[in-house]
Amino acid sequence: MSAGTPARSAAPRLRADATRNRERIVAAARKLFADEGADVPLDEIAKRAGVGNATLYRNFPDRATLIQQVALSVLESIMERARAALADTGDPFEALRDYVHAAADERIGALCALLTEHVVLHEDEELFAVRAQLEDAMEELMARARAAGTLREDVGPGDVFVALARLTRPLPGSDCMKHDESMFVHRHLQLFLDGLRAPAPSALPGHAITLQELRRP
């Protein structure tokens, strides 16, 4: 074996290590941002990820860059769930229900705070494109359920996104949750989803919330 062989074989390993470090940093930041907010110390993120501070800053030179990547990671994960729901050929309402629960698992409410406070969405082409795909997917899933007669007529995609955003935000106060938070979210989300089924037992006040309304400043 020549002297140059180890160096050539080490290069892919180094790239793989760098990729894993980046993924660990994003995963740790995602959890800490959701639990503690976007101002959590970057040193704590590095510690949680099991990497040194230098590694974190080499991958993400500032907080804004890390927040953008966390937001993109969450949106892309939710988009994968949306594709699965759109490919489901079974009951349209069940496909919508499964997608909404899957989006809740991604803690989209915490993401909303990140996007609102730290990212100018219309200036970030990647984030804007994925969000547009998610909105299209939600509208398509709801249209299918409505056409099947299982989704009430007086609700819109904005209603679902508002419910998701509110239910997946951490509750204030350390004494609020004495049980599993995930169970709390999915239990109350299911109550909301049951209320979307047709025939509707009552008339809703106001009107169906559109995605355009949610984007208004």
Image: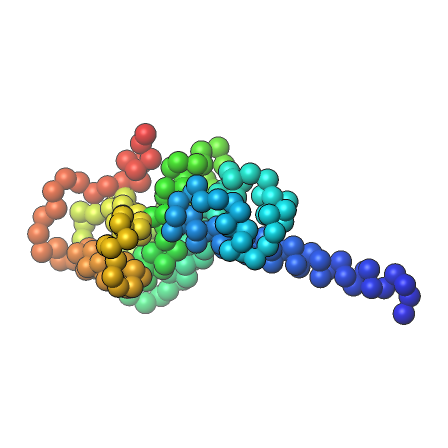
Name the side, left or right, on which 127 lies relative to 186.
right
Name the side, left or right, on which 86 lies relative to 94.
right
Question: Total label count?
Answer: 0
Question: Residue drawn 42% across and 48% down?
Answer: 33
Quarter of the picture holding the C terminus:
top left
- Estimate the x, y position of residue 203 in percent, counting from the top left: 9, 48
- Estimate the x, y position of residue 43 in percent, counting from the top left: 53, 47
72 versus 197 height, above or below: above
Q: Nearer the viewer, residue 106 or 6?
A: 6
Q: Residue furthest bottom?
A: 1
Asked where in the image residue 208 lies, by quadrant, the reply is top left
Question: Residue drawn 65% across and 55% down?
Answer: 18
- Estimate the x, y position of residue 10 in percent, counting from the top left: 77, 61
Name the side, left or right, on which 35 lies relative to 191.
right
Q: Residue furthest right?
A: 2
- Estimate the x, y position of residue 151 in percent, counting from the top left: 21, 56
Q: Nearer the viewer, residue 159 or 50?
A: 50
One can see residue 182 in this view: yes
Q: Residue furthest left?
A: 202
Asked where in the image residue 57 lies, by quadrant, the reply is top right
Quarter of the picture holding the N terminus:
bottom right
One can see residue 134 in this view: no
52 versus 93 height, above or below: above
Question: Residue drawn 51% across and 38% down?
Answer: 64
